[in-house]
Each structure stands twice: as C-alpha cells, then as structure tokens.
Amino acid sequence: MRAARRFFAPGVVVLLAIMATLEVSTSLEENQSFDEHVHLASGYAYWKAGAYWCNPEHPALIKLLAAVPLLFLNLTLVSESPAWKVRSAPDVGVEFLYYNSLPADRILETARVPLMVLALAFGAAMAWWVRRRFGQTAALAALAFYCLDPNLIAHSRYVTDDVALAGFFFLASVAWAEYLATSKERYLVAASLLCALAAVTKYSGLVLLPIFAVLYAIRWWQTPRGFSLRRAVADAASIGAAILVTILVVYWPDTLRCLRGGPGALASHAYLAGIGIVARMNSVGHDNYLLGRLSTHGWWYYFPVAFAVKSTVASLAAVAVMLTAVVGWWRHSGAPGRWQRLREAPFLWYGLSVPPMLFFGACVASTINIGIRYILPVYLFLYVAASVALVNLPWRFARVLLAALLVIQAAECLSIYPHYLAFFNVLAGGPANGPRYLVDSNIDWGQDVKKLARWLKSRGTDRVYLRYFGSDRMWNEGLKTATVPGTEERAARENVDGFVAVSVTNLMGVDIRGTYLSIDTPVEVRVSQLMGDQPPEHEYAWLRQMTPVAKVGYSIYVYDLRKPHSNAPGP
C-alpha cells in the first residue's frame, strides 16, 4: 500500500505535464479563436480603465485573469479611438491585439497561459478530492481521462470561459455535497466561494443555485432531522452573500460607479446588464447549425447529438458502463426495497450524478446551440463516476475494462493531435466527417489561418481567395487575399485563378454575410435574412460540388482552381 501511495504524486505530475505539453505545443500553432481579441481587450480595459461596458455578456473573472500577465507588458489601450468612443468591443479588440506595441502572437500566447494553468489546477484539485474519498487508483484514472480529453484540451488553450466554468462547477458541486454529507462548515464556505466564482465566470454558473436546492432536498429526504427550513435559509444566505460580495469585488469599478449614482444606478450594473443580454439572446435566438440544417432557436436534441459525436469512444463507453451498473442494481433490488435503497445510498453519489444531469437538461432547454463547449462540466463528473465505479464494481474484469478505456482515451487524444478543436469520434466518421453534424466552435473557430499560411507557403504562394470564419487579420499571417465569389456570381467564378480557401462554417451555409446577425435584429428579420429567398447553403454550392485538395486543420477547405496557363499559384 505504501509503495502504491508513492506513485500517486508522480502520476499526477506526469499526467498534468502531458496535458500542459499538448496545450502549449498546439496553442503555438494556432492564431486567435473567434472571440479571443474581444476577451483580451475587455480584461485589459477592466484593469486599466474600469470599462465594464466592454463585452458584458460574458462575466469578468476569466477576462481579468487572462489580462493579468499583460499588465506587465508595454501595451496600449487606445481609449480615444473611434471604436472606443462608440463602444464597439470587437473593434476595440482588433485595435488592442493587432495594432499594439507588441506582436499579436506574443500578446495572445501570454494571455493564454493563466487559462492553461487554471485547467491544470482543476485537474489536480479533482484528483486530490477523488483520492481522498475513493482512493488513488480512481483518482489517477479520473485525472487521466481528464488530461487526455480532446475537447477539454482544445478549450483550455483559449481565452474563453468554458473550461473554467467546468472546473468551478464541478468543485462547487462536490464541496456542497461534502457539506450536506458531513455538516462541516468549511465545506459550506468552500461551496459558497466556488459557486460565486462560477457565477462570475459564466452566467450558466448560476444554474448551481437550483442544483444546490435539489441536492439539499435529497439530503433532507435521506435525513429529515438534520436539515430544517431554518438551516436551509441560513445556508442559502451564506451562498447568496458569497455571490454578492464576489460580484461587487470583481466588478469593483462598476460597483463604485453604481454606488455613487444612487440606488437607481444599481440596475445598470455590468453584471446585471450581462444577464439581460444573455436572456434576450436566448429569447431572440442565435444562428445554429445541426445535421445540415439552420435554425435561430435550435433543437432540443442538439446537445445529445453533440455529445454523441464529439465525445471520445471511451467517454461513451463510460456512460454505457454507468447505465449498465445502475440498471443491474435496480433489477436486482426487490421492488419493495428499491426506494429505501435509494434513500440509503451514499449521498456523494447524488453529488456526482444530479448536477451533471440537471446542467445538461438546462443546456438542452437553451436556444443557443453553438458548441460542445457549453456542456464541458458534464465530462468531469462522468470521468470521476466511471473511474470510481470501475475500481469498485464487483465485476470480474472491471479494472481491465478501466485500463482498456484509458488506452482508448489516450489513442483518441493522440490521433487528433494537433487539431483538438476538430475532434469527432470514429463512430461519427472522425473530424473529416464532422461538418455533417456540427460546425462553429465544434470544429471551426477561425483558429487555423496560421496552418493555412504554412500550407500555401509550402506551395510557393502567399495569395489565396479566402472566405474566413474568424477574426484574425490576414496581413498578420502574411497572406494576400481576394474574395471568394458566390454561386450566383458566375462571371467572377470564371475568373478565379488560384487556390480557394473557405472556412467550413461558411461552406455549410452558416454566417454567410460575414458575421452573426445582431441580437438587436427583430426575430422575423433574422429568420428572413438567415434563410433568404434561397437556402443559404447554396452560397458556396459550386465549391461543395468539388473535392478539396486539403482540409487545413479540418476547418479550412482548400480548392485548387489554378488555370492551366497560370504562372502564379495564387490570385
């Protein structure tokens, strides 16, 4: 036993080192994803100017964290520019990242470091808790699943809030479960703080509040005497106070502005304004794509499909293992004793099962269907539950199965390197088949222009006809571009002479006019503009009939339309 214990710390270090290596090496090969310039400029503006009007639809914590190392660089925030004066966050982001005193790549990679470190810290915290409660074998297995998950690796490298929410959500849930199981005050403090951090990381972190209430009700059902209404009110007050104080501190400049403006000014607080924007976006709808179809209000089955095609085969097998174990337990329990056994079940298992199910349900109800990243918290619970179950199940080959799943997870992780954002499992046909199911941040977030530039350079050109879904500046990557003509532009199509590159999101008919429609656009106009007189997928139907010569990073499709007499390989 002592010898086995000696392997735990080195095992954690090795697994986290593998994840860090994969994060850093692949991050260096990619340019900014769709929104990173906005998040970076916003975080820097919060620190330097208290300008919380910038990008309020995302809470401030992660943007502030990403901007911390930028405070030590000689950067400029152009607060007198036209973009700043009209409060255009995307344009402010472009100015900050691409027209600053340092190259955009250095700014971007510097800001990504804190988010990578945070993802590693979540992995370490998860392993520590699982070891403490379920043993080191389960802890190392859960950490291995976590560190080798392509989706978690992909999103942990960007200046976004998705992996951060996953970590805070998981830790807050297990801390709350620990508190309800042991009644120790330190877990209440931890759960309150972690819930507050989730709330200022992403607005979906507020889903923890009803989840906490459901867990409290389950614990009351198990032991009514220890969980009175009075205690529920006191615990709720503790959590509410933690969230309120955290919001006031994280948004302190804007909080101070509101306090100086009197009680009426509190309604304009940036955090509340952001909630209003997200609520309106969810009501108005978003441009969504699934299985070749477009919609402004999504589909209830979007996230089930996304989970099925974007999860690793090992993850899907883990779900099957958990369902088999539950069904077996239920079938072998006598009917009269089933509910009693549920009532007597270890409460920590409720802590591992209820939060991911309710969170997944909340995502299914959303009209914003643009990425697997929205349900990343589910994976942490799944990996812990599956690891613990396979270590402890009385099945003859349970541990062999666990080892096999870890080998499969590692193989899937290595198979997609270095294109982690584009991961689709082999059952779905792999990343080359991904656009049949999903686009946007599931495969194409504007991250592969650097790879496109290298591909073109290897063929002796820096010129390309380009239709790009993203925010990078082509001159920053050394490219000279021309516009890709649409299907109706027959004369322009005949004159194309060179390589043509189109982001797969555009190729599949999404965002054909260069940017997502504004949430300020009326619903009927949004639908009309999205669908138009002809299906938007016809915009590049003339290209979709051809076979691309390359799929750069699986997100940019390249077609060779050089004319036979052409001396130059580009436009």
Image (spheres, helix red, strand yellow):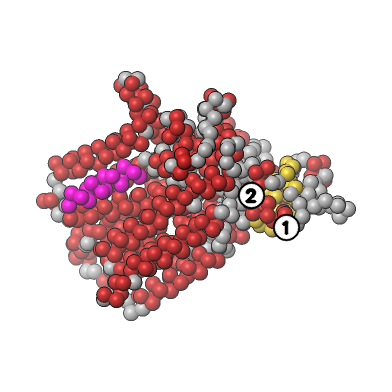
Residue that carries the numbered disc 2 in the rendered image: 449
Residue 469 image-quadrant placement: top right
Res 535 seen here = no
Q: State the mark number for residue 474.
A: none
Residue that carries the numbered disc 1 in the rendered image: 458
Give residue 410's position: percent from left, percent from top: 48, 68
Per the image, label 2 sits on a secondary structure element best described as helix
Q: Residues within 10 Å of mark 1 (few under 14, many from 20)?
A: few
Of all residues, the one furthest to the left in this rendering is 225
The part of the chain drawn in magenta is 184-198
Give residue 154's position: percent from left, percent from top: 50, 55
Judge whether 253 appears above or below 406 on screen.
above
Q: Residues within 10 Å of mark 2 (few under 14, many from 20)?
A: many
Residue 396 image-quadrant placement: bottom left
Nearest the eye: 547 or 24: 24
Give residue 429's position: percent from left, percent from top: 57, 63
In this rendering, would 25 be left or right of 341? right
Tell whether position 377 is magenta.
no
Q: Earlier along the polypeptide chain: callout 2 or callout 1? A: 2
Label 2 – label 1 distance at C-alpha: 14 Å
Give residue 13's position: percent from left, percent from top: 39, 64
Residue 551 image-quadrant placement: bottom right
Kind of residue indicated by mark 1: Ser
